[in-house]
Image (cartoon, rainbow, N blue to C red):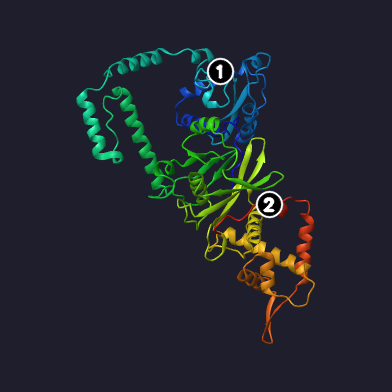
Amino acid sequence: MPRRKRNAGSSSDGTEDSDFSTDLEHTDSSESDGTSRPSARVTRSSARLSQSSQDSSPVRNLQSFGTEEPAYSTRRVTRSQQQPTPVTPKKYPLRQTRSSGSETEQVVDFSDRGHLTGKHERHFSISGCPLYHNLSADECKAPTERQLRYKEKVAELRKKRNSGLSKEQKEKYMEHRQTYGNTREPLLENLTSEYDLDLFRRAQARASEDLEKLRLQGQITEGSNMIKTIAFGRYELDTWYHSPYPEEYARLGRLYMCEFCLKYMKSQTILRRHMAKCVWKHPPGDEIYRKGSISVFEVDGKKNKIYCQNLCLLAKLFLDHKTLYYDVEPFLFYVMTEADNTGCHLIGYFSKEKNSFLNYNVSCILTMPQYMRQGYGKMLIDFSYLLSKVEEKVGSPERPLSDLGLISYRSYWKEVLLRYLHNFQGKEISIKEISQETAVNPVDIVSTLQALQMLKYWKGKHLVLKRQDLIDEWIAKEAKRSNSNKTMDPSCLKWTPPKGT
């Protein structure tokens, strides 16, 4: 299911404050064991800070504090706004355990001035509070002597790097690369300082250790797809199935995609740079349908191979039975979009073979998760049968259908048959006539009639029962959604069948 649109201004949800309460509880529990010095220090600190408190109302639980904190984090504070704004001290519950076993709460007041890093004027969580760490805001801004000494030490270590590689070293590196290619890591000695190389090795070891922990916990299995989410336009989508993206992308856990050209990237920074240069605002190919903000583009897999391959890889994240990824040349792709002032946003698509021996009018169909349960799936199905009517053919989707696809098609076939029976005035009806008028395969018509219990065998003949209760129910649903624009208008289609089909 689609996730909620991400808010760039959102911040901590109170988790760190919860950890703070746990740490204080651990400290207080040590007091009951006989150590009184930490208790005295906390008491002096709280007494000193309580003098600057302007509000003495206690905060009784972590839930009230957790709901109070976002009031600070959701607004953006500038320096010009800080001076006239009165400072309201923040209060954190401090739980103390007496020797008798009863618990009491003591309120410790903290101002939100300053930040532990010295880079910000205010803090919004206990972890960034200078007073909690027994420091002042001015002390955090100025680097300590230890930090200065460490910075000088690092500068000296980085000066020891060799000026360049010798001819022998270059030959050694080239030989290693030609021998092993991408199966081994390149030689890294003398490329940078020993200090930076050591940092890189430690980071590698830490990353491999974290991956091992995830594998042991069962969150990652060998050879499985680790893409859990994709950033797609305004949405962050959870994936459902494995998709054969290149290994260097599949192991990242999250992919960033351009919603117009469908190029996939490794990071938000790369996506941002790409979006600044990307000139695509709609799918490639010919726009063959437009009504309001809804458009459908016909994309040839042979002419726009990369786009169609990326579209198939994206679809596999949400389809279980899809097997086509790279061999897209024999197919046509019909991409439905919704237009606004930023471009044409992908709603869904279906593909069909240019020359289908079994008259399949759909090979693969997908509605993007953020547009599901809004009627767009039926619009795609209706459009596929609209093309079959223009071609004067009877169509059917390629099997096997996915679970959601089967539900959508059965609902569409039911609606088509009830509409036909409602408008039918004769006494004898033919399955072949229904098929020719609706472009639905006779096999699909019979299976739908059986599912609706409208097909009976009596005295050697098959009879179609016109169940008025089902027709009345369909009419009532149609009346409720009469104002909806989720229908395809044949007059808005500007299309001629491609040659060879």
- Which is more N-terminal, label 2 or label 1? 1
Say whether residue 412 is visible.
yes
Which mark lies nearer to you, 1 or 2? 2
| Amino acid at the residue labelled 1 | Gly
- In this rendering, is residue 95 above or below 148? below
- In this rendering, is residue 273 above or below 449? above
Nearer to me, 58 or 398: 398
Which residue in the rendered view is the most extreme toward the front?
499
Residue linked to disc 1: 114
Q: Which image quadrant for residue 78?
A: top right
Q: Residue at x 58, y 20 (%)?
A: 122
Of the 4 image quadrants, the one containing the C terminus is bottom right
Residue 327 rendering spot, x and y as whole percentages:
45, 53
Q: Residues within 10 Å of mark 1 (few under 14, many from 20)?
A: many
Nearer to me, 87 or 400: 400
Residue 184 image label: none
Measured Cα–Cα span from mark 1 to mark 2: 63 Å
